[in-house]
Amino acid sequence: MLPVDRIRRNRKRNGEALQADLPLVVIAKVDNALQLTAVDERAAREGLYPGLPLADARARVLALDVVDADEHADRALLEAIADWCGRFTPLVALNLPHGLFLDISGCAHLFGGEAALLKTLCDFVQGQKIFVQAAIAGTTAAASALAYGANGTIVESGQEANAVAPLPISTLNIEEKILYALKRAGLKTIGDVASRSASELTARFGASFTFLLSQALGQNSQPIRPRRPLLDYVAERRFAEPVVTTEVITRTILSLASTLENLLEERGQGARRLEASFFRTDGAVRHIVLDTANPLRNAAAISAYYSERLAVLADPVDPGFGFDLIRLSALATEALEYRAAEFESSEDQNEIAGLIDRLSSRFGSGRVTRFLSINTHVPEFAAAFCPAHRGTNPGAWPQMRLENEMPRRPLQMLSPPEPINATAEIPESPPRQFVWRRALHKIVNVEGPERIAMEWWCDADAKTRDYFQVEDEDGRRFWLYRDGLYHRETNEPRWFMHGLFA
Amino acid sequence: MSGVSLATLRAAIARIEAADVSLAEENKRVPLGCNAADAALLGGILPGALHEIYADERDSVSGSAFAAMLALRTARSESTILWVRQDFTAHQCGQLSAQGLFDLGINPNRLLLVKTRTGAEALRAASDSLSCKALGAIILEVWRQPKSLDLVASRKLTLRAGASNVTIFLIRVAAAEEMPSTAETRWFVRAKRTPDFVEDWGNPLFEATLARNRHGQTGAWAMEWNCDARVFREAPQNSRAFFPHAARGPHQAEPETQRRSASG
C-alpha cells in the first residue's frame, strides 16, 4: 500500500486532480512483462491484486489509473517514517520493501505501555494518510507475520506460537517458490507447517526457512540491525506543547548539552562529532552534525557552537508547527583528559582549536582548512586543503629553492590553468609575448624551462609541460607552460597560464 | 586669549601627545628592514592595529604577498596566522599555493585558511577571530567594496585588534576608491620591474606607497623581499635613474603621482 499512499500524498500536495473515480494501480516491469506491484482499495475490490500482469488487469477493468513504480521514492518515504519512529526507540531497522522493525525493549513504559505506544504510532501514520498495520511480538518474524495477518495484535511473551498458528503462510516473508510448494502440499497456515518435523522441512526447503519458521514461532530471537548505530551518549527532551521560538530551542540545547556533559564526564570522554535532531510535529526530522577539533564536553561551548551553526544554515531549521522532541547525541567520542597547563604554547593551541571549532561550526568544516603536503611533482596536486578540525599532520614541504634564488613556485595558482595565446620565435623557445585575459604582455625576463612530466601511470594522455617564469614590462611575474613536447607529443603545442608570482 | 594662540596651544599639545605615544610604542613596533620606510613608520609596523593594503586587480598577487610578509614580520614566531579569503578572489586571482608561500619563506603549516562566500562573511569571520589572542596575525582579503565594510566596521576592527593585540591586515583588491577608515597605515602596492642591470632577477619587488600613516610621515619606496632572511630591503635602484634616456615603455615615463592614482 505504501506506493499508492505516496502517489496520493504527492498528488494532493501538488494540487493535481485526484482521479478518485478510477482504480489506481502501480506497475513495474518484472520478467519482461508489466505487472501490478501495488493496488488501491477500489482496484482490489475490482479483483486486481499485485502480481497480476497489466494486460490481464486491463482486460478485467477498462478504466485504470496506471502509475509507474518508483522504488527510490518509496524507500525515501519509508526512511522518513523510520526517522520519525526514532522518537520511540533508537533501534529502528528497515524491513524492505515496505516494512519497519522497532526494538521497543525497555521503551514501552515511557509511552504508557505497549498498547498506548502502538496506538500513538498507528494514529500518527494514519493521520499522514499512510495505511499502516502493526503488531508487537517477541521476534521480528512473528511481529511481521502478525502485522500482515492480524493487525494490532500484542502478543504476550512466549505466546507467539499460538498467535501465529492460524495465520496464512503468505504472511511469512518467504520466496514465492516455497510458498507455492507449501500450498501444493496442503499446508495453508503457519500452524500446519509448524506441525511437520523440522528435519523434514529443512530437507525440502533449506535451513534458512526452518530458522525463519522457528523465529515466527517465538524462538531464536535475533537482534535487529538498526539503521543508525546505537549511541552511548544521548540526551533528549520531549515537549507537551511544540516549541517554536529560537530562545527555547537554544535553552533546550544548553540543558541537553549539560546532561551530555555529565554522561561524557562519567567515562572521561569528549565528543568529536555531535548531532542535534529536531523532530517536528508533522513528522519531519532534521539532523545537524557538528565536528570539533578537540574532544569537547563543555556544555556552554557545545551550545554556543550550535547557536552559531543554526544562525547561518543555508536552509534554516524550519520549526513549522513546532518541535515536540529535540535530541542531542555524541556520534564519535575520544578520551579527554584535563592536563595542567604547563606551557604557554599548549594553552595557545587550545585557544586555536576553539577558534577552529567556532569558525567550522559557522562556515562548515570544509571552509576552515589547513594545507596538507602531498608527495607528487604535479604542481596543482602538491597541496590539498584539509579541514582544520581533523588536526592532520600537514607534512613537510620540499626545499625547491636554493639560498638567494628566486621562488620556484607562484604564490597564487590558477585552477584550472587558463589557456593563453603566446608567441614564440621557434616552437621550442620561450615566448616573446602573450595575451592573457585580453591584455597583451611583453616579456622582458625569462627563466626556464623547467620540464615537468605528468604521472603517466595515472593519466596516459597527460602531456609533458615546459614551465617558464617570465616577467613582463610592468614587473608582473607569471608562471606559464607549454603543454606537450614539440614533435614528440604534439605539433601545435598550447600555452597555459598557471600562476602568479609576487 | 586670542583664537590664534589657542590653536597654537592645541597643536603643541597634539604634538606632545603624539610624541608620547610614539615613545611608548617604539619598543613594540616591528621593523620591516627597509630603513627609509622604518624611519617614516617610527620604527616599524605597529602590532595590534589595522593596516590596509590596496592593490589593483592585476597586482593582487603583490598585495597578497606584501600583506603576508608584513604578517610574518609582526606575528610571534611559530604562531598561527589566519587568512580569510572570498571564494571569488580565489576564482579570479588563483588559489593560495603552499609551495609558493614556502618559497617566500613563509611556513604554510602556520596558516589557517577560511574561505567565505561573501565579503560580509569574510569580515565577520576576521572580526570575530580578532578576540583570539593566540593568533599571530590575521589577513583579511576582500574583493572590491563589500557594503558592510564601512567606517564603523573598520573602527570595530581597530578596537578589537587593540584589545587583543592581534594585528590585522586588510587587503583591498580592486577597490574602486579609498574608503574612510581608522587604519593605522594604508599602503598601495604594485609590482616593480626588475632593473636591467640585475642578472639574477626573481626576488619579489614592490613599489609600496604609504599613503596614510597615523603616527608619522608618508612616502613611497621600492622594496625587495629577501626570502632567506625574511626581511624587506631597499630594492636595487632602477636603471632609469642612472640612464634617464634609456628606452622604457610609454607608461613607465609617467609621473609618479599619476601612477599612484592608477594603482589605487
Image: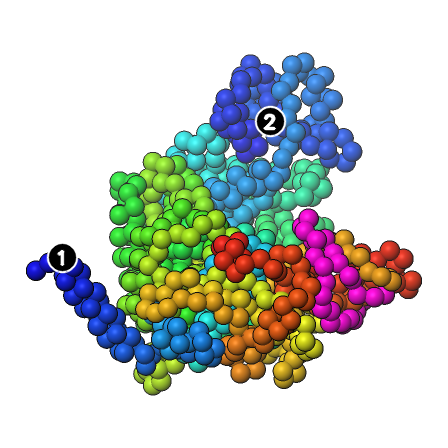
B94 and A173: which one is in front?
B94
Residue at position x 41%, y 31% from top? A127
**Which of the colour schemes (rainbow, by chain, secondary structure, one colour) is used?**
rainbow
Image spot of residue A31 (x, y percent): 77, 36
Q: Is residue A487 left or right of residue A229?
A: right
Which residue position holds label 2?
A39
A143 and A11: which one is in front?
A11
Q: Main secondary structure of the magenta part?
A: strand
Residue contact at pointers 1 and 2, CB within 8 angstroms? no
Residue at position x 64%, y 40% from top? A187
* Count of number-bearing discs: 2
Q: Which residues are magenta?
A: A428-457
Image spot of residue A198 (x, y percent): 63, 54
Distance CA(mark 1)–CA(mark 2): 98 Å
Q: Secondary structure at mark 2?
A: strand
User: Within 10 Å of the Cα at label 2, are there few (<14), some (14-19), or many (20+) other Cα atoms?
Assistant: many
Tell whether position B93 is magenta.
Answer: no
Q: Is residue A492 visible?
A: yes
Say if B37 sits above or below A15 in the image: below
A18 and A292: which one is in front?
A292
Say if B249 sits above or below A318 in the image: below
Which residue position holds label 1?
B3
Say if A273 sits above or below A122 in the image: below
Spot the residue most to the left.
Answer: B1
The three-letter amino acid code for the residue at tag 1 is Gly
